[in-house]
Amino acid sequence: TRAVAPSAPARDAMASRPRVYMDVALGAKPPARVEFELYADVLPRTCENFRALCTGEHGGKLTYARSTFHRVIRNFMIQGGDFTRGDGTGGASIYGATFEDEGFAFRHDAPHLLSMANAGRHTNGSQFFVTLRPTPHLDGKHVVFGRVVSGADAIDAAGLVAVDDGDRPLAPVVVAACGQAAGA
């Protein structure tokens, strides 16, 4: 099969998608930058929530800065975003405690996709995960809203850290800093 170039409107939408970053530190190692492209042209509310939590512009505890990846399952995903409790039971969105699933336009069909973690339908908050492989069993249950565009090696390294019986990293995996990428 021959690849087809995206149409002009599709190229324009992709060019205008916001990008955010997280500097991820594994244990005592220096942080490595991971940059995400957000599918804001398709999922504006979900992407705005993640973008604003990266910039911390809503103040208070509403930021991913200094939060941890509290759950790592090798060859599956790494999960973070619980900046209130740090154990997977907390978090909040810029819209309140939770917000509805915005849509399931994208599938979990590759590694390094950014998706909302939830506790069932319409329970999105701040928790998210990054896939380490295709995870099609999550399609229609979790909203894929972005992808890693640089720093995939840092995500893969986080996916290999030692964990306890509850999939909690033995050494901290921390978002040392985060924000909106320059020019995004």
Image (tube, rainbow, N blue to C red):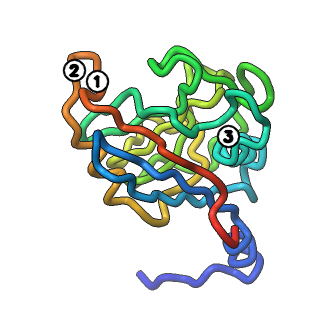
- What label sits on residue 53 in the rendered view? 3
Residue 121 in the image, given as x and y percentages of width and height? 63, 22
Residue type marked 3:
Leu
Is 40 positioned to the left or the right of 106 in the image?
right
Residue 100 appears in the rendering: no
Q: Tag 2: Cα neighbours inside 10 Å, few (<14), some, or many (≥20)?
A: few
Mark closer to the chain start, 3 or 2: 3
Residue 87 sits above or below residue 67 on the image: above
Label 1 belongs to which residue? Answer: 167
Mark closer to the chain start, 3 or 1: 3
Label 2 belongs to which residue? Answer: 164
Residue at the location (54% across, 26% down)?
82
Residue 83 sits above or below residue 9 on the image: above
Q: Do the residues labelled 2 and 1 touch (CB within 8 Å)?
A: yes
Residue type marked 1:
Asp
Residue 123 in the image, given as x and y percentages of width and height? 65, 21
